[in-house]
Amino acid sequence: MTVIKGAIAVLTRYPRPGRCKTRLIPLMGKRGASMLHKALAEHTISRLKTYVIGHPADLIIFYSGAYEAEARKWLGEDIVYAAQPPGDLGAKIAYAFEMTFQIGYGRTLVLGTDCPDMDLKILDDAFSALESKDMVLGPAEDGGYYLVGLKHACSKELFEGIPWGSAQVLETTVERAKSLKLHLEMLPLLPDLDRPDDLLKVKDAGIKAVIETICCATEEL
C-alpha cells in the first residue's frame, strides 16, 4: 500500500510588539499581545513537531515579519522554512498550497497558531477526510476557520475576495468551494484566540497560565 505523504503548513508571524495580535493590544498592550502570540506559536509548533515524528507528514513554517535566520533561531532548525508572499491572508494560503503541491506532497493542511485547544487527533481526522474529500475545514467560533486542507491544487479563486477578519469567512469559503464543485468535510467547531472575549474560552492549561500572567502584569502597570 502506497503511503501518501502530507504537508502541514503553518502561517505565523515573528513576535514583534505592535505587529501581532493587534486586536488584543488595547487589553494587553503591545508587549503583552506579542508575548501571547509567541506562546501560542511555540505551543502549536511544539505539538506539530511531535506529530510529524510518528506520521507521514512534514512540517513547513511560512513566516513573516523577520528574516529566516530569526525565525530559525526562534522556532528551531529542524523545520522547513519559507517566506510568506505579499498580499492578504488568501494570497498566503493559496501560496502555501501551491508550493507544497509543486514539491510533490499528496495532501496539505494549512493552519495558523491561534487555536491552542486543537488536539492532534484533528490532524488525523483532517488527513483521513482528504482520502475521500477534496477539501476539509476546521470551523472557528468567530466565523472563520482554524484549518483548511486540500488533496490537490485548485483555483486561486477559492481564496480570493474573502472578507478576512469578518464573521463571514467560513460561510463565504464554503460557498466558494461549492461553486468550484469541491467535496468538503467539516471538522469540530473550536474557538480561535483573536479578541478579548476569546481569552475566556481557552481550555489549554499552559496557555491559560500565560494569559493570566500577562493580564496580571498589565493590571499592575
Image (cartoon, rainbow, N blue to C red):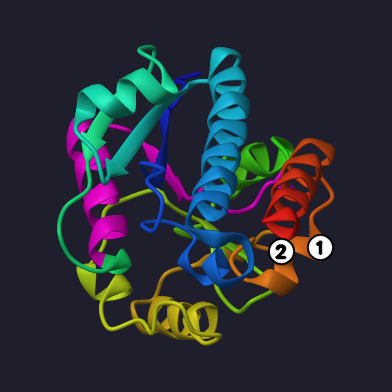
Q: Does residue 174 appear anywhere in the picture?
A: yes
- Viewed as shown, does residue 89 lie left or right of 110? left
Quadrant of the rendering where the C terminus is positioned: bottom right
Query: Label 2 belongs to which residue?
Result: 191
Q: How far apart in space, not on screen, are marks 2 and 1 (Cα)?
A: 7 Å
Disc sitting over residue 110 in the figure: none
Please state which amino acid type lies under the numbered disc 2. Pro
Mark 2 closeness class: few <14, some 14–19, many ≥20 residues within 10 Å: many
Along the viewing direction, whichever of 9 and 20 lies nearer the viewer: 20
- Residue type (three-letter) at the residue carrying disc 1: Lys
SS label for mark 1: helix
Q: Residue at x 26, y 46 (%)?
A: 65
Nearer to the camera, 210 or 92: 210
Q: Which residues are magenta?
A: 91-118
Residue 120 drawn above or below residue 136: above
Residue 105 in picture, x, y percent from top left? 32, 33
Q: Residue at x 74, y 59 (%)?
A: 219
Residue 212 or residue 102, whichever sits in front: 212
Q: Residue at x 42, y 56 (%)?
A: 20
Near mark 1 (Cα within 10 A), the count class, few <14, some 14-19 or many ≥20, is some
Magenta residue check for 141: no
Q: Earlier in the sequence, mark 2 or mark 1?
A: 2
Do the residues bearing badges 2 and 1 touch, measured as CB atoms within 8 Å? yes
Instruction: Tell me if residue 110 is in the magenta stretch.
Output: yes
